[in-house]
Amino acid sequence: MHMERKPWKAYVLWIVFTEAVGALAGLLTRESTKIYAETITKPPLSPPAIVFPIVWVILYALMGIGAARIELSPPSAARSRSLLLYFAQLAFNFFWSILFFNLQAFGGALLWLLILWGLVLAMVIVFRKVDPLAAALQIPYLLWVSFALYLNAGVWLLN
């Protein structure tokens, strides 16, 4: 019996999974982010705290949509590499929050973030070979991680 693929299920699964990873990171760093907001000197251009959860919900949704598009594409080596890079960057994304907020290891978090930036760039490049729209949906994420590098470096230098 032939199983009909339901693309909407892939989108829901990937978006919910990605948002859940972000929500767990937020939950695990909730107390530390409050302490951070009250005690850490921040660099110029630091947005108000409310901006971060709003931006991340949007970015995680775009990431999930991109991953679903990749999963729904025909099997290939590039598709497999794309999904592997997706999981790798998501793991680095998750642990950055813990390094930065919970451990306040600002220098280590900066190095970690540089690796994350490289993983996101690699993901965009490989996504593009499989699905150009999936790659384009990751550009806001790459730009946000670039901005986060500036913020992380500023916090490291100022504290």
Image: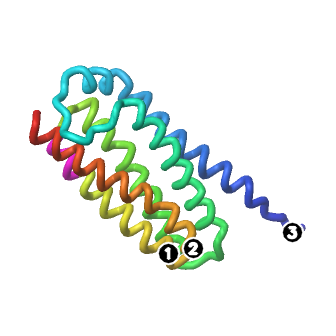
Q: How far across and how far down the image is residue 25, in percent?
A: 42, 36
Q: Quick one: which residue is furthest to the front in this view?
A: 45
Residue 11 position (above or below residue 50): below
Q: Label 3's element?
A: loop
- Asked if the magenta segment contains residue 79, the reply would be no
Q: Nearer the viewer, residue 158 or 22?
A: 158
Amino acid marked by disc 2: Asp
Which residue shows up at 35% across the image and 50% down it?
92
Which residue shows up at 39% across the image and 43% down it?
94
Are circles 1 and 2 on residues that touch, CB within 8 Å?
A: yes
Marking on residue 131: 2
Magenta residues, as a range? 106-111
The quadrant in which the N terminus is found is bottom right
Are circles 1 and 3 on residues that touch, CB within 8 Å?
A: no
Amino acid marked by disc 3: His
Q: How far across and how far down the image is residue 27, in percent?
A: 44, 28
For marks 1 and 2, give the CA distance: 5 Å
For marks 3 and 2, give the CA distance: 26 Å
Task: Please report whichever mark, 3 or 2, sits nearer to the chain's N-terminal start.
Answer: 3
Marking on residue 128: 1
> Depth-wise, is mark 1 or mark 3 nearer the camera?
1
Residue 35 position (above or below residue 110): above
Residue 71 position (above or below residue 153): below
Residue 122, picture quadrant: bottom left
Residue 104 position (above or below residue 154): above
Mark 2 neighbour density, 10 Å: few (under 14) some (14–19) many (20 or more): some
What residue is shown with label 3? 2
Which residue shows up at 30% across the image and 63% down it?
118
